[in-house]
Image: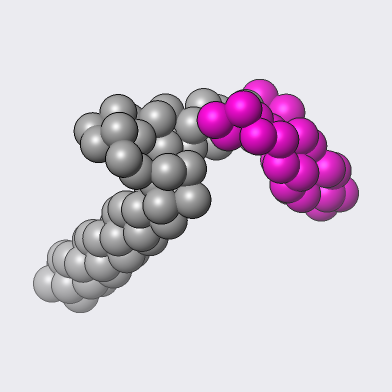
Amino acid sequence: MERKTYSVMLSGRTYSISSGENEHYVKRIEKLTANAISETMLLDKRVNFETAAAVTALRFAEENILLQDEMTRLRRELADAAQQKD
């Protein structure tokens, strides 16, 4: 899949990212990330952009790990169910 470079805006700062996905998909990522950073900054006015971005990255990483673990659990359940069927 061909990768393209896109510009995304996070808290007034422009970043370039490379993706093999379409522009609509990249915009969804941009919006989700921008909203999460903004929410973190709103919770505590003393939090700067860099800290909010780091906290957001950690939250996204945690969510990713939880989803991977859930996917592994569901795959095991499916495999077990398939074995019991045989």
Q: Is residue 19 left or right of residue 60?
A: right
Q: In the image shown, does 56 or 68 lie closer to the viewer? A: 56
Q: In the image shown, does 39 or 49 lie closer to the viewer? A: 49
Q: Quadrant of residue 42?
A: top left
Q: Is residue 16 above or below residue 30?
A: below
Horizontal and vertical percent for residue 74?
23, 61
Q: Is residue 29 left or right of residue 82?
A: right
Horizontal and vertical percent for residue 27?
62, 27
Q: Is residue 45 visible?
A: yes
Q: Is residue 81 above or below residue 43?
A: below
Q: Tell which residue pokes out farthest to the front in this image.
A: 46
Q: In the image shown, does 31 or 82 lie closer to the viewer? A: 31
Q: Is residue 36 visible?
A: no
Horizontal and vertical percent for residue 37?
41, 37
Q: Quadrant of residue 78?
A: bottom left
Q: In the image shown, does 76 or 35 lie closer to the viewer? A: 35
User: Which quadrant, please, contains the C terminus?
Assistant: bottom left
Q: Is residue 7 above or below residue 80?
A: above
Q: Residue at x 73, y 47 (%)?
A: 17
Q: Residue at x 47, y 43 (%)?
A: 49
Q: Residue at x 35, y 35 (%)?
A: 41
Is residue 6 inside the magenta stretch? yes
Q: Which residues are magenta?
A: 1-25
